[in-house]
Amino acid sequence: MSANQNYVPVGDGNFGVEETEQVNTSPPTTAFNLPENVLAPLAYLFGFPSAVLLLVVEKNSEYVRFHAWQSAIMNLMLFAIYILVTFLSFLSGIVSIAVFFLYVYTIYRAFKDAPSQTLFKLPIIGQIAENQVYGTNSLPF
């Protein structure tokens, strides 16, 4: 490029967006003023208490509420499985490792899928959680 040439930008770089249109670049608001990619993984990170806290407080984000429901149901089912497995000591180590990886993966997916609002649904549990958030089932929170 020679010294005499100047670069002149054409438009503002937003292809397909008229100048009068407003582009919403702000993250969706949540009750905690945190982005969804932070709150959704928190539903899994601290287990049942954080899931219930998010269910009670968070009313703005359906994405966060879905993950809070899924986490709460998952934690209740895992608690029941742990009670059953305690009688079979040879399985407790294997189940603990599997549960650890389940937690890591659900936290990762809740974080990664937040910008696109894609719901990562666990088998059976995910459908129940989705019905609670988007369907006709309703519990008090």
Image (spheres, rainbow, N blue to C red):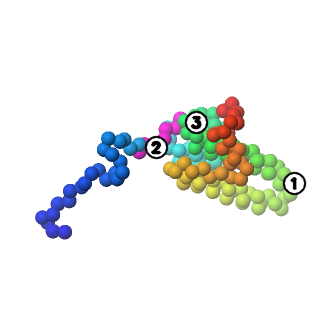
Q: 135 left or right of 22?
A: right
Disc 2 designates what residue? 27
Q: Position of residue 22 (x, y in %)?
A: 36, 41
Q: SS class of the residue under badge 2?
A: loop
State how far apart marks 1 and 3 are (Cα).
38 Å
Residue at 66% of width from left, 44% of height from top?
Answer: 130
Q: Position of residue 111 (x, y in %)?
A: 55, 51
Q: SS class of the residue under badge 1?
A: loop
Disc 1 designates what residue? 87
- Badges 2 and 3: C-beta atoms under 8 Å apart? no
Instruction: Identify whether 3 is placed above or below 86.
Output: below
Residues 94 and 140: in front is: 140
Instruction: Identify whether 76 is placed above or below 140.
Output: below
Q: Earlier in the sequence, mark 1 or mark 3?
A: 3
Disc 3 designates what residue? 58
Asked if residue 51 can be seen in this view, the reply is no
Q: 24 left or right of 32?
A: left
The quadrant in which residue 46 appears is top right
State how far apart marks 1 and 2 are (Cα).
47 Å
> Type of residue at label 3?
Glu
- Badges 1 and 3: C-beta atoms under 8 Å apart? no
Q: Earlier in the sequence, mark 2 or mark 3?
A: 2
> Type of residue at label 2?
Pro
How many numbered circles are shown?
3
Q: Position of residue 61 (x, y in %)?
A: 55, 39
Residue 29 is one of the magenta-drawn residues: yes
Residue 95 is one of the magenta-drawn residues: no
**In this picture, which residue range is highlighted in magenta?**
25-31
